[in-house]
Amino acid sequence: MAATGSPITVVEETPTPVRRAAVLAIGTANPSHCVRQDEFADWYFRVTKSDHLAMLKDKMKRICGKSGIKKRHILPTEEMLNAHPQILDRAVPSLNARMGIAADALPEVAAAAAAEAIAEWGRPASHITHLVVTTSTGGAAAPGIDLRLAALLSLHPAVQRTLLYLHGCGGGASALRVAKDLAENTRGVRVLVVAVETGATAFRPPDEAHLEELVGAALFADGAGSAIVGAIADDDPAVQESRPIFHLVSAAQVTMPETARAVELRLGEVGVEYRLSAVLPSLVRDSIGRCLMDTLAPRGLAGGGWNEMFWAVHPGSRAILDSYEAALGLEPKKLAASRCVLSDYGNMLGATIFFVLDEMRRRRRRRLGEGGDDEEEEGDQKCVWGVMSALGPGITVETMVLRAAGVVDEH
């Protein structure tokens, strides 16, 4: 007996307009306390009462001299350390003191960066629909830094908050990836992305049993970066609400094989503890090309013409940038923005990538405004496609394909 019932009706849906995510504004901020790199070793060993460790101090001076850093902003001051002596004693639990310092100071720095981005955007903060915050050093509490930041900025009570913890140097890129997905999947979404970090939660006196911490002490710095991310549909009448800076074309996350112990972050009784393998630069040099090929191939950008694109690489260290340059055969000017940020600010973990994007934006505007007198710079400014890349614990490679706004027809 044949089954009976209503006939099947095929409903043809109206095609969904394509939404293209873009960075609409960028903001950055740092604590006021700034230390010159050539003076850091003397300061560090003095405030930690470690001047008697002369050989370690000399080693620290050599590390600082080779770091490619000129100055850094850091939250810890001598007065702060004197007020929290447990931070300088490895045998005493200090997590509560460190988390308290971060909870008191970081929301203000984060708010300064976010306010700068909102001001550039030119619309009320209450128009922000989503807030994505990332930090590896800003404490672990609920309510967290995201709620405090929303209050400081007077965001709408209905703003949807997402908080990412312990993504390390890749945190800012991870947050931008999340923002891209949010913006492109819901009409009218405007995402405020904020990354904020402080070395106060990992600050410890030098110790001969923890030589790898000297490298971190010489590299890591404090700061906050922010961006407004939005997407405009093909049929959106508000096309001119903001002029995009970078279009976020596609994003990917790949883990380098057998690197789970190469970079580690852990929250313990003495604050944030980290492990940086001495072979990290060589791991990057051996694997980054293959990771990028796999990521960019679907976009038709993996033909090996790396110098035909612009590069926004997180400056984890001078050695990391050298590894990217060597592995991909990049011309020196390709990583000039990353090296400039490393020199002026150090490694601010997840916040650093916003400083790199801001520096790239600044350089592109200057070159376009000046007509590109320098032949090499003129060639770089004409690059339409680019790559943002950052490394997190794992080693996890965050990659974003970018398209420069203003280089080709926006529509």
Image (cartoon, rainbow, N blue to C red):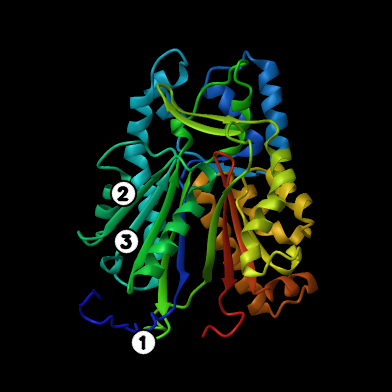
**Is there any visible trace of residue 351 in the rendered image?**
yes
Q: Which disc, if any, is residue 146?
A: 2
x, y (%) of residue 177?
A: 47, 58
- Secondary-structure class at tag 3: strand
Q: Quadrant of residue 383?
A: bottom right
Separation of marks 2 and 3 at Cα, in angstroms: 11 Å
> 249 or 314, which lies in front?
249
The x, y position of residue 68, in whole percent, is: 70, 44
Q: Secondary structure at mark 1?
A: loop
Which of the 4 image quarters holds residue 62?
Answer: top right
Where in the figure is residue 315, as x and y percent of width and height? 63, 48
Earlier in the chain: of badge 2 and badge 1, it is: 2
Question: Relative to residue 372, is residue 310 depicted above or below?
Answer: above
Residue type pointed to by label 3:
His
Viewer-proximal residue, 393 or 362? 393
The residue labelled by disc 1 is 237
Q: Residues within 10 Å of mark 1 (few under 14, many from 20)?
A: few
Residue 27 left/right relative to 332: left
Q: Which residue is mark 3?
A: 130
Q: Is residue 206 left or right of residue 155?
A: right
Q: In the rendered image, is residue 318 in sight? A: no
Q: Amino acid at mark 1?
A: Pro
The tag earlier along the polypeptide, 3 or 1, is: 3
Give the mark, 2 or 3, whose residue is nearer the N terminus.
3
The span from disc 3 to disc 1 (Cα, nearest Å) is 21 Å
**On the rendered structure, is 272 left or right of 336?**
left
**Residue 58: which quarter of the image?**
top right
* Lateral position of residue 73 relative to residue 334, left or right: left
At 60% from the left edge and 82% from the top edge, which residue is drawn?
408
